[in-house]
Image (spheres, rainbow, N blue to C red):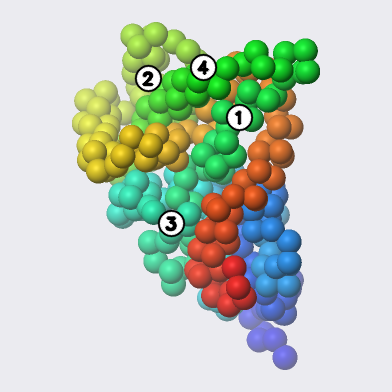
Amino acid sequence: MPSLSVIGDSTALRLKYIRKVIVYVESESDVNLYKTIVGPGYDEFLDFQKPPEKGTGCGPARAYVEKYRPANSQIYALLDGEAVVPEKDGFTGLVKATASIFSLNRETGILFLADHEAENILIRQADIVSSIVDQVTLANLGRRQPDEVEMAVDEIVQRQFEGALCKYTSYRLHSDGKITGVLAATHLDNLSEADTLNLLQQRVSSKQCDWQTFTAELVIVQRVVEAHLELLTPAEKIDTKRRLADGKMAMKIMQKIYNIAETWQGALARKVALTEYARRFRQDLFTFTNISVAA
């Protein structure tokens, strides 16, 4: 017999008797990507869902866990890595993350990607250079050179890495009440360094934050990242920048430059599912959610 407190809440009743782990995520795209990465054969143990309530970003998924987890310990949320930045020790945790998933406090049921967001997984794990080289007609097959594409991808990632540092800075300032909102897409257009700086100054001012306050916090953010990068090999540095860059913006620019339809993302997800990363992601997720079947 359910407790009186849940009788009027159909969601609570459904979750009470579903008898498997429910992981709430930020979007339907996340649902599809994570299901693909985990692979078939685990539906009886695990279900990814997007909360039906309206809202953007991590808000709805986090709210569902806070509401329903106290009565059901099988309720979790898996949020983009950027969502952890405003929390105490969150930014350092993201920068130094070594597993595919991490948590600041396992008791809360709130988990975070070790990537800025889902698109970073595609960029890092789907052999993005080869995928771009092959996204051509037969008539143009072989015209895109892997080394040239690699250089272009690195340039795109570097710019969106710098943009992400600005976004991380605004997250931290916003949590302290020093800026009204979070900066996004500050480096989307291929502007000169001077024009990018001018646009960034305008964006910061429009959110009621003075430039000195913003730059002082940005320096702190940069130092945390640079200190970590100094410990890495050249290949690890490249991978870390691809992990921390604004993945959605980087993906959008790659698609625009190479005239690739967004539908290629499905093929990228399938490639990720065949990698060692998929096994590690599944194993990390099962460990955090106490799923005891072999990962």
Q: Secondary structure at mark 3?
A: loop
Residue named by callout 4: 148
Q: Earlier in the sequence, mark 2 or mark 4?
A: 4
C-alpha span from label 4 to label 1? 11 Å
Q: Secondary structure at mark 2?
A: helix
Mark number, residue 99: 3
Mark number, residue 200: 2
Q: Earlier in the sequence, mark 4 or mark 1?
A: 1
Within the image, what quadrant is residue 289 found in?
bottom right
Along the line of sight, which residue is nearer the eye, 257 or 218? 257
Q: Up-down: is 140 above or below 3? A: above
C-alpha span from label 3 to label 4? 31 Å
| Residue 263 rendering spot, x and y as whole percentages | 74, 32
What crowding class fits label 4: few (fewer than 14 Cα within 10 Å), some (14-19), or many (20 or more)? Answer: few
What crowding class fits label 1: few (fewer than 14 Cα within 10 Å), some (14-19), or many (20 or more)? Answer: some
C-alpha span from label 3 to label 2? 33 Å
Residue named by callout 1: 130
Along the line of sight, which residue is nearer the eye, 205 or 128? 128
C-alpha span from label 1 to label 2? 33 Å
Mark number, residue 291: none
Q: Earlier in the sequence, mark 1 or mark 2?
A: 1
Identify the residue at horizontal 39%, vertical 54% (top origin): 98
Q: Up-down: is 155 above or below 240? A: above
Q: Earlier in the sequence, mark 3 or mark 4?
A: 3
- Is 136 on the left-hand or right-hand side of 75? right
Q: Earlier in the sequence, mark 3 or mark 2?
A: 3
Q: How many marks?
A: 4
> What kind of residue is marked 1?
Ser
